[in-house]
Amino acid sequence: MRTAGPFPIICKDSTILTHPDAINTATIRPDRRFLLASPVHFLALGFGSGLSPKAPGTAGSLAAVPIYALLYLAMPPQLIFLLCIPLFALGIWLCDRTTRALGVQDHPAIVWDEMVAVWLVLAALPESLPWAAAGVVLFRVFDIWKPAGIRKLDHSVGGGLGIMLDDLVAALYTLLLCYLLRALI
């Protein structure tokens, strides 16, 4: 496979994918062997949650919740929030490497971006189960819907940075809406 920037991508079967949506819907499916072949893939695929045959992004987001709970036992939310900065940077590299290995830009199985975004949301929201549930649900809504700004980022920024960035913006939309709701309640 060769790439010229994020597009076009020439697949092994000589198919040329030139549009981000075409690349996102390619049929390459990573499996357990791919997951366990490298610690990079293991992390990028959300410790295996990205292998979910249905809604891998939601599976990765849900898998992030108990991991957040473990982090919360070891450190305060403010520190988890700060930890998201190097985890975001690591995610750029992880997602880029895994994207290249899969030959597909932003494969649905790559869920490290969802996990870091959920950790960021949970760390920034008030510490309660209703806020945590609202945060995860709203994040998934924004991540799937991709309103203004997110869709443009998703199509214009390639590689690991693009994968991580659109979820960061979805997390920011989530936090903005949650804090607006909190002010009204």
Image (cartoon, helix red, strand yellow):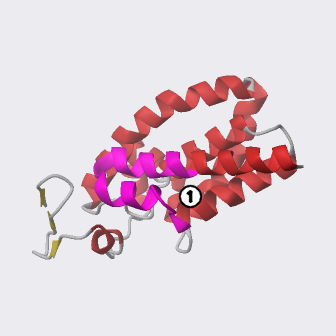
Question: Could one spot residue 56 in this view of the protein?
Answer: no
Which residue corresponds to the image point at 29% horizontal and 50% vertical from the top-left?
Answer: 159
The quarter holding residue 56 reads: bottom right
Query: Is 101 left, or right, of 33 in this rendering?
Result: left
The local crowd at label 1, few if under 14, some if 14 to 19, many if 20 or more residues have their Cα within 10 Å, is many
Which residue corresponds to the image point at 52% horizontal and 63% vertical from the top-left?
Answer: 147
Q: Position of residue 91 (x, y in %)?
A: 42, 40
Q: Which residue is mark 1?
A: 49
Look at the numbered disc 1 and give the secondary structure of its residue: helix
Which residue corresponds to the image point at 81% horizontal and 38% vertical from the top-left?
Answer: 126
Q: Is residue 153 magenta?
A: yes
Query: Is 25 left, or right, of 70 in this rendering?
Result: left
The N terminus, quarter of image: bottom left
The quarter holding residue 137 reads: bottom right
Q: Position of residue 44 (x, y in %)?
A: 44, 48
Q: Is residue 120 above or below residue 162?
A: above
Q: Residue furthest front?
A: 184
Nearest the eye: 162 or 50 = 162
Q: Position of residue 59 (x, y in %)?
A: 61, 62
Query: Is 79 left, or right, of 104 in this rendering?
Result: right
Q: Position of residue 152 (x, y in %)?
A: 38, 59
Which residue corresponds to the image point at 75% horizontal and 24% vertical from the top-left?
Answer: 76
Query: Is 42 left, or right, of 3 in this rendering?
Result: right
Nearest the eye: 69 or 4 = 4
Query: Which kind of residue does numbered mark 1 sit on?
Result: Ser
Q: Which residues are magenta?
A: 145-170
